[in-house]
Image (cartoon, rainbow, N blue to C red):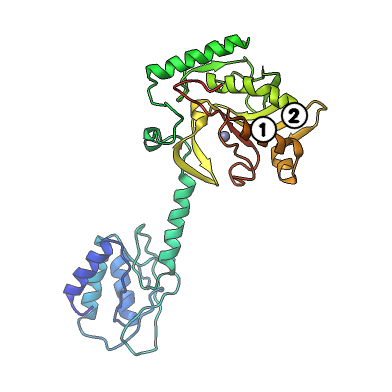
Amino acid sequence: MKDLLGLVELARVLRTQASVIVVVLATRKQLCQGAAAIICQRECLTDLQVHRRRILAKVRRMFRALAVLSLIAGVAHPAAAGPTKATSKATSKATSKATSKVTSKKQKVTTTKTPRKVANKSTRTSSKREKVSRTPTRKSLARTDNMPKGFVWPPNRAMLAAEKACEARLDELGIAWSKAEREGRIVNAVTVSENGTFELGGVTYVSAYRKGVQKLDCQLALALATFGPRLEELGVQQVTYGSIFRWTNVRVNGKTKNILSRHALGIAMDIVSFTDRDGRVALVQRDYNTGDELLLGIEQMVNDSGLFRLLLTPKNDPISHGDHFHLEVAADYTAPTS
Ligand SMILES: [Zn+2]
């Protein structure tokens, strides 16, 4: 800093919180006095490594001006800052330390190369990541490019007609069902049991966690009823599921996306395990990666059936689907697929 003009420029830069190099030319005594001027305490600025050089007569006055400007800009050198390197053309090897207990929140005078800056950046990024919510956002709700065929919101006439046709199919199959109040973006919410345990297509479905009424879209109920006999062929007697409806965004590979989950439409089910006729439990988390034949057979059958979208498993999404199968009906809101 050669003159006050430089100080003004520095203050401008500080307001933007950019990294700048501050070189203060002063004696230890003057630093202490300067610090006192800043914080009204008899403390020195310890963390500034100052290259001492020729002390100009006006340095002290300039330092005080810097202090005032720094406070105006809401910045000052933090007491907690580690040792930093000041760059200067000064050739003296001597450095001096001073202390400061300044506690301004925005304090950030900088003296340095970038490690602190990088660390701050990564902290910001990780805290952002932690705050990510799975609740649908305006953006995820506005997207229609990832939705099933014919899906719009609110549901149009064609969709409601397709759901009516679906209900008629449930009746034809002799399935006991009830209409439920719409939730999230379930086009046509139905229930097939009062307590979360129900039978569709000869297979019993049991909730692993939440007991009580489970809402689902008619098309998922119809697909499960249609697919049931094929599961039975494989020896499946019971399916234990984690959840069906959830008001949430998609999560794959450990990342939450700006895409509304199919669970929010009531057309997907997360399956924890399958139990065969002999009572053996094939747990997705434990047995899938050891090549459990039942689980692999089910995967194959689901994918070959054409009733569902690609089954998500510990193989194709080990991070977010390491402990369950995501089974999702290939819903068609222009006409039910099954
Ligand atoms: Zn799922």
**Position in image of residue 162 (x %, y %):** 46, 17
**Position in image of residue 149 (x %, y %):** 45, 28
Q: Identify the secondary structure beneath mark 2.
A: loop
Residue 323 occupies quadrant: top right
Q: Residue at x 20, y 81 (%)?
A: 58
Task: Say whether disc 2 or disc 1 marks the residue closer to the N-terminus.
Answer: 2
Question: In the image, is 324 to the left or to the right of 88?
Answer: right
Q: What is the crowding at mark 2: few (fewer than 14 residues within 10 Å), some, or many (at least 20)?
A: some
Q: Residue at x 27, y 64 (%)?
A: 14
- Three-letter residue code for mark 1: Met
**Position in image of residue 118 (x %, y %):** 43, 64
Residues under numbered marks 2 and 1 in contact, where contact means CB atoms less than 8 Å apart: yes
Question: Which quadrant: the N terminus?
Answer: bottom left
Q: According to the image, label 2 marks what residue?
A: 234
**Position in image of residue 8 (x %, y %):** 19, 69
Which quarter of the frame holds ligand 1?
Answer: top right
Give the number of the disc on residue 301: 1
